[in-house]
Image (spheres, grey):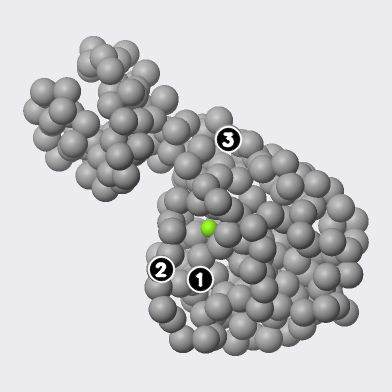
Amino acid sequence: MIKAIVFDLDDTLYLEENYAFSGMTFIGTWVEENWGILGLESELRRLWNQGIKTKTFDHAFQNLEYEICQNSVKELVNVYRNHSPEIELEPDSIVLLNRLQNKYHLGLITDGYKVAQNNKIDALNLHKWFSKIIVTDELGKSYWKPNPRSYKMIEAEFSCKGKECVYIGDNISKDFISANQRGWMTIQIQRPNKIHKQKLKLKPEYYADMIIDNLNALQDGIWEKL
Ligand SMILES: [Mg+2]
């Protein structure tokens, strides 16, 4: 019998691109107010739409014809990670969490820089639904998924193991391997607008038991059918 349902955060419960857009707006205003530079947000969005997602600040300032030193880039990355994002849960996430809340223990395991992840958790008001939230970065960088530590912490917190636990995430390279090895049920959600499109070929143990594109697919009783 299922006791605990555990979720990933980014691109599972909300769209990570909306976090990026929120950051672009915040950074655009910050740069305008602090450095007097106009037009950064629209340049960042233009680059994003072109698929340029690394060294974005360097490219953007170059295109705006400003020279920027690496310390300033670091400062901007810091501002970005520390900003309080304007993001929302996807509608199907709210429906599912409301439905599951009083029937199961709900847990969250999320990677990413701790300040940024905690700001997302606050913005999405996740403590309303989750009784155990693990930001793996708070344990240390080596405990990011797929390290099994956070999965073990969930088992200890909710006194459950193996087929009593479900993990729902999006990233095959790290979300499911530890859960599979511990006998959990695993479900991959592939939201059409997810950031990381994965074309990897991995060993079978990296894949989830089931793939869905919307959490509405998880009707009551689905857990027993896996
Ligand atoms: Mg994710």
Earlier in the chain: of badge 1 and badge 2, it is: 1
Q: How far across and how far down the image is residue 72, in percent?
A: 19, 33
Amino acid type at circle 1 is Ile
- Report, in whole angstroms, how far the alpha carbon at label 3 lies from the one at label 1: 24 Å
Seen at 32% across and 44% down, the residue is 51
Q: Residue at x 50, y 71 (%)?
A: 172
> Which one is in front, 71 or 185?
185
Residue 83 numbered mark, or none: none
Of discs 1 and 2, which sits in the foreground? 2
Residue 6 position within the rendered picture, expressed as x and y whole percent measured from the top left: 70, 65
CA separation, marks 1 and 2? Answer: 10 Å
Residue picked out by circle 2: 199
Camera sees residue 43: yes
Foreground mark, 3 or 1, reads 1
Query: Would residue 152 be seen by someone viewing this image from the given angle?
Result: no
Q: Earlier in the sequence, mark 3 or mark 2?
A: 3
* Residue indicated by mark 3: 87
